[in-house]
Every structure is written in C-alpha cells, then in structure tokens.
Amino acid sequence: MDIPLDNDHKKIGKELDLFTFSDSVGKGLPLFTPKGSVIRRELERFIVDEEIRRGYLHVYTPDIAKLDLYRKSGHYPHYKDSMYAPIEIDKEQFMLRPMTCPHHFELYLRKPVSYRELPMRIAELAKLYRYEQSGEIMGLQRVRTFCLADAHIICADEEQAIDEIGKALDLIEYVTSVFGLKLDVDYHYRLSLGDRTNTEKYYENDAGWEKAEDLLRKLMQNRGSKFEESKDEAAFYGPKIDIQMKNVNGKEDTAFTVQYDFCMPDRFDLSYIGEDGEKHRAFVVHRSSIGAIERIMAFLIEKYGGAFPLWLSPVQVRVLSVSEKHTAYAREVAGALKAAHIRAETDGSNESLGKKIRAAKTEKIPYLLVVGDAEVEAKTVSVESRDAGKLNAVSIADFITRVSEEIKARK
C-alpha cells in the first residue's frame, strides 16, 4: 500500500515532538522525547505481555561481551564491518553486541536441559548496536542503536522447530492485526534464501541449506501464504522468512523475521538429554515478533500519519476549559482520568476555545473534553472524538468506562 509522502515519520516525528537527533550524541542515535517514549513503552509492554502469555521466558543480558563470544558465534567474521570497534579493558577485548543469540545460548548452557523442557523460548527486549554506514542511516528506520524484540527457541527436532516457526508467524500476524496492518496490503512475506556459491558469506553445509529452505518453503505453502523467494538474503547461519514493509519513499525493509538455524547448535554445542537418557543435538529458531522498536515506530507513524490509535497515543485526552473560571474543574476531570490510568492533560491557557481545539487537533489527540458552566454544574464533560466527531455530554465516570474499554481492546 502506498503511504502519502506527507506521512514521512521524520517530518511527523518533529511536528509531534516524538524523537530527535543530536550531532553531539552522534549520527543514528535517536533521543526519544517524553511523548515518543510513551509510544515506545506501550509497544514494549504489549509485546512482552503477549509473549509471556504464549510461553516465552523473558530475560536480561548485557549490552557488551567479550569479542571471543562473537568469534565463536561467527558474527565477528561475517558482520565485523557493521560492528562497533572492539573496546580493550584489562587486556581483554569487548564489543557492543550486534546480536543477542550468543548471550541466550550461554544462558541455555548454564545447566543440563531435559527434552521435557523443550521447546524453550528465551526472549528479550535487547539493546543492539550496529555501525550502519552514514549513507544508510535514515530516521528511525535505520539507526546505529536499536531495541529488538528478540527470541531464540531451542527445539528437540526439526518437526518441533518448524512447528515453532509456524507459531512465531501466528504471533506476528496477531501483532500486525492489532496494528491494523493487512497481509499482502501493508506487508508481505519473503522467503530469504542463501547462495551455495558464496562460501564467504554463508555457513558451508549444502545439504543443510537444501533441507532448511525446503522445510520453510513447505511450511509457507501449507499455511496458504503468498510469498516471494529471494536469493542471497538469508542469515549466514540459515534461511529465513521475512516480513517486508515499505516506507513513504517506497523503500522496502524487513520489519519482522523468523529464521531457521542449523549452524549455531554445533558452534555452541547446544544439546539436551533425551528420553533415552542420552545427549542429543538441539535445533534453533531465531525470531523477532515486533522487530526493532525504532523501526516499527517509524512504520506506524507513517501508517497512521501521526493519528495513533487511542492505546498508543502519547496524550489520550485533553481537557479544555471554556474560560479561566472553569480551569479548576478541568483539572479535577484530568485528575480523575489520570487516576484511571488514562493519559490526560489540561489546557488552561488564556487562548480562545477555538484556538485550543485547533491546537489539540493539530496534535492529533484522540479525545477532547470541553468544560464550561453547564458541565461544571452537571458534573459532566462535552466530548469530541478525533475519529467520530462530537458526541453527547456524559458523566466523568461514563467517559472513563468508555475510554478504558477502548484502550484495553487496543482498537
């Protein structure tokens, strides 16, 4: 779906004061304002709660690790040009992490694992760092530090791995439905394949590549999903299913991804104790349910044109007083809304009501509540919805019930 050029997230982000960049901080390193941080926090809470509900084990791991860890995983030789330079501490070399998988594997290896514990879904909202080229940096869509909703699923066999990939796609399709994104309209699937001739870029195992690519292809066919195939777009350790979206300029980027890995289990000796009491090699699925928080924010700013659904809006309700004598009641209304966990603020300025309304509409606030003599006397509020226009006057309690239900439903 084509997005209007006026919806450019960089332009809207500045107009709505959501994020900024500073040369003093560095290129590609976004600074989120209080309003932008609200959106980010809501996205993070949403995906963590949903993943936990689906059996993911959320963890915390360091943003930095020894360089040898990334040599072991293969990330350093394959991605060293896009990694930050090593940091020397106490005669040891460390790096800001570009990926989370080796950290999660080390967590998995802390104790023996039984087949009864698999699949084990290890997840994290992980801060990652990649040294993108200056010409590639673009708003929030391509940055040098980002927070990835990442997970690594340790499986007992290929059948379990493919089942988990299907469940990861189910989660992604649920997430996109909450955002109002439609498959084959707002996003599409791409099966990203390797290249057997490019042994410098990819892990060398022709039989493994053939089998993994065939498994993912059959999974997509069995789901009845339309997808394109793209050679030389895989991860170095295996093929992947990418969810592709376009920005306002028509450039396509990967928003979410699910990857099949037949390389890392050998590198890290990822195994489990089977029903027979013997040690067996595990299988690994990498997946990102909501992608990088920064990138999905950019896509959603452009999708909504800054008019976020109520649950994501930085300010959900603004209370407008008709004149200064109604300011105390306006603050009382806003206080009741805040107590009900609704993001509300007042506009008690000396501007005319018309100017106050225009300012709130420019900021794309979902609900405006006007209070004047009649509302103060009746203990009500006059409601105007950004999306539905003017509504009937209601009590504060009734409005709180209505808005709370809409927020909970994430309409």
Image (cartoon, rainbow, N blue to C red):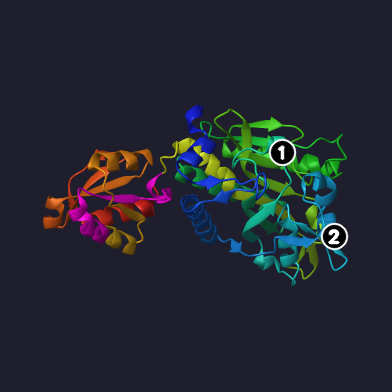
* Three-letter amino acid code of the residue under disc 2: Asp
Label 1: which secondary element: helix
Which quadrant of the figure has residue 336?
bottom left
Q: Compared with residue 349, is residue 358 higher up or lower down, i.e. above or below?
A: above
> Alpha-carbon neighbours of circle 1 within 10 Å: few (<14), some, or many (≥20)?
few
Q: Foreground: 383 or 261?
A: 383
The relative height of residue 361 versus residue 152 in the rendered view (above or below) is: above
Say which residue label 1 marks. 134
Residue 331 position within the rendered picture, expressed as x and y whole percent measured from the top left: 26, 59
Give the total of numbered labels: 2
Residue located farthest toward the front when viewing the structure as drawn? 350
Query: In the displayed structure, does residue 32 sit left or right of residue 86?
Result: left
* Residue 19 shown in magenta: no
Q: Which residue is mark 2?
A: 68
- In the current view of this chain or complex, which residue is farthest to the bottom? 111
Q: Position of residue 366 (x, y in %)?
A: 34, 45
Tell me which segment is drawn in magenta.
Answer: 309-333
Residue closest to the eye, 316 or 282:
316
Q: Amino acid at mark 1?
A: Ser
Q: Earlier in the sequence, mark 1 or mark 2?
A: 2
